[in-house]
Image (cartoon, helix red, strand yellow):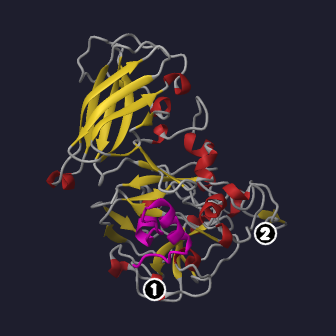
């Protein structure tokens, strides 16, 4: 690939809220390749630290102007292996990125002047859409502008999120949810299949902040990376490490003790430093927590309203549902086993086609989140109450005996896996095979 004669571009990603503060600016972008095919991109970041990402674009019309709309990205899967001052928070000054196109984009050639580097600075309160957090190396966080930019495990790999084992064992992939100021309907409309009139009252909700949420439920391997000494016995053993963590109590996650619910660690107070979330915060430097009831439902719905699964397909049935078969593990697509006329739990050593599923085994919702329907119940921050309309989406901090859990599970029928369905559990209950979770954190660096 001959790209010795190149053009370059700079972009800044900012929010209106950032206009009163210093806005990061990229200038002086250069791009060149040496005889060993190593591409070097240099740039200057001015005014404020920023998260920096890079793309490479091509244009068959080599005489086109720099802002010609014909410039087209070669795709994130070709540039994810760029290293240096990229994919992370970068301080101001002259910076360098290196890229080996032959390692991620082999056998491609571009005419002289037919490629350009695009370096983007993201304000720290408006970080990119995907964040990858390393659980094995403390305080190691990377940011990517789209799913196809996420690093793969081998050259030419497709389906990076589901195929890269690291994302189910030693790293957390987080997706930014743009929720701030969006008015939406929480709950369900009258007539929705298996609607609970006592707990799913439709209400208009507007959340105040954007947030990152886990693309997958936290797995058993990820749990062991953070809290190995508190590991519980899994319900299912085959490929257990990449199945969701299950049997985790709410108290384990925030209070550290499985039996006592210590008010000193009730939200909005920080988790106990020795709890799973406390240890995760210490390891990563990020404010990880459980999603609120409203945050969970907003992310699960992915923009789809009452009566729809989170890929936009219609809820067909309260028991077995062909549309849900594609989206998550539940009783009728392998979760339980038909024994005569009834469904029963599979054996502890069953394969991954029964019981809980390996995370990411089914199709994602419209925002790229997996297993929001079925697999394991997911704990939320809130104390449980049937009628939550007075909260308008705020976290329920009024103590009761139970905490909210969402999403259904491998042993429940379709109706209990809907986005609006609200369940609850005693916070000390570990329930092997039952309770799992995914995590959220602030969208943007503090």
Residue 419 visible in rendering: no
- Image-based side of 240 in relation to 35, left or right: right
Task: Check disc 1: other Cα within 10 Å, few if <14, some if 14-19, many if 20+.
Answer: few
Residue 264 position by quadrant: bottom left
> Could you say where residue 137 lies in the image, as x and y percent from the top left?
54, 53
User: What residue do we see at 25% from left, 40% from top?
Assistant: 12
Image quadrant in which you'd find residue 135:
bottom right
**Relative to 149, is 270 above or below?**
below
Residue 344: numbered disc: 2
Report if residue 295 lies within the magenta region.
Answer: yes
In this rendering, does residue 376 appear at all? yes
State which quadrant residue 350 falls in: bottom right
Mark 1 touching mark 2, by CB under 8 A? no
Asked if residue 167 is positioned above or below residue 223 in the image, the reply reads: above
Q: Left or right? Give the position of 8 relative to 322.
A: left
In this rendered view, identify the residue nearer to me: 102 or 381: 102
Residue 270 in the image, given as x and y percentages of width and height: 43, 76
Residue for point 46% across, 59% down: 213
Residue 47 drawn above or below residue 186: above
Locate residue 226, reporting x and y percent. Answer: 59, 64
Relative to 364, residue 317 above or below: below
Residue 5 badge: none
Separation (CA) of disc 1 from disc 2: 40 Å
SS state under label 2: strand
Q: Which residues are magenta?
A: 269-297
Secondary structure category for the residue under label 1: helix
Residue 51 magenta-highlighted: no
**Residue lying farthest to the left in this orientation:** 20
Which mark is first along the chain, 2 or 1?
Answer: 1
Q: Which residue is mark 1?
A: 264
Q: Position of residue 330 (x, y in %)?
A: 66, 62
**353 lies left or right of 110:** right
């Amino acid at each position: 690939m001959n790209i010795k004669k190149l053009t370059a571009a700079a972009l800044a990603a900012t929010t209106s809220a950032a206009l009163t503060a210093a806005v990061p600016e990229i200038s002086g972008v250069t791009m060149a390749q040496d005889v060993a095919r190593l591409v070097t991109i240099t740039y200057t970041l001015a005014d404020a630290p920023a998260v920096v990402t890079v793309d490479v674009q091509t244009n068959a019309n080599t005489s086109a102007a720099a802002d010609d709309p014909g410039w087209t990205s070669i795709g994130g899967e070709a540039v994810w292996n760029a290293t240096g001052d990229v994919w992370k928070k970068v301080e101001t000054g002259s910076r360098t990125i290196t890229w080996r196109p032959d390692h991620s984009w082999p056998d491609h050639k571009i005419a002289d002047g037919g490629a350009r580097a695009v370096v983007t600075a993201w304000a720290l309160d408006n970080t990119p859409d995907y964040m990858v957090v390393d659980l094995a190396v403390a305080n190691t966080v990377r940011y990517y502008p789209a799913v196809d930019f996420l690093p793969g495990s081998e050259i030419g790999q497709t389906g990076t999120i589901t195929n890269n084992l690291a994302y189910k064992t030693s790293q957390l992939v987080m997706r930014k949810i743009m929720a701030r100021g969006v008015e939406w309907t929480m709950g369900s409309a009258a007539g929705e299949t298996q609607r609970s009139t006592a707990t799913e009252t439709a209400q208009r909700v507007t959340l105040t902040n954007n947030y990152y949420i886990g693309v997958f439920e936290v797995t058993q391997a990820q749990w062991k990376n953070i809290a190995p000494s508190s590991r519980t016995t899994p319900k299912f053993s085959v490929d257990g490490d990449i199945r969701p963590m299950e049997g985790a109590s709410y108290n384990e996650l925030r209070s550290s003790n499985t039996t006592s619910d210590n008010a000193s660690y009730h939200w909005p107070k920080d988790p106990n430093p020795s709890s799973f979330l406390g240890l995760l915060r210490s390891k990563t430097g990020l404010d990880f927590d459980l999603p609120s009831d409203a945050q969970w439902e907003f992310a699960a719905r992915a923009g789809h309203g009452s009566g729809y699964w989170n890929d936009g397909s219609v809820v067909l049935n309260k028991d077995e549902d062909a549309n849900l078969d594609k989206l998550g593990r539940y009783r009728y697509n392998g979760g339980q086993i038909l024994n005569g006329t009834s469904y029963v739990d599979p054996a502890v050593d069953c394969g991954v086609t029964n019981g809980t599923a390996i995370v990411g085994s089914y199709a994602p919702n419209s925002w790229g989140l997996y297993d929001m329907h079925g697999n394991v119940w997911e704990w939320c921050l809130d104390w449980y109450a049937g009628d939550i309309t007075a909260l308008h989406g705020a976290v329920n901090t009024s103590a009761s005996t139970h905490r909210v859990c969402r999403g259904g599970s491998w042993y429940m029928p379709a109706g209990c896996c809907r986005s609006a369905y609200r369940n609850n559990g005693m916070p000390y209950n570990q329930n092997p095979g039952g309770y799992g979770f995914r995590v959220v954190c602030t969208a943007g660096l503090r």
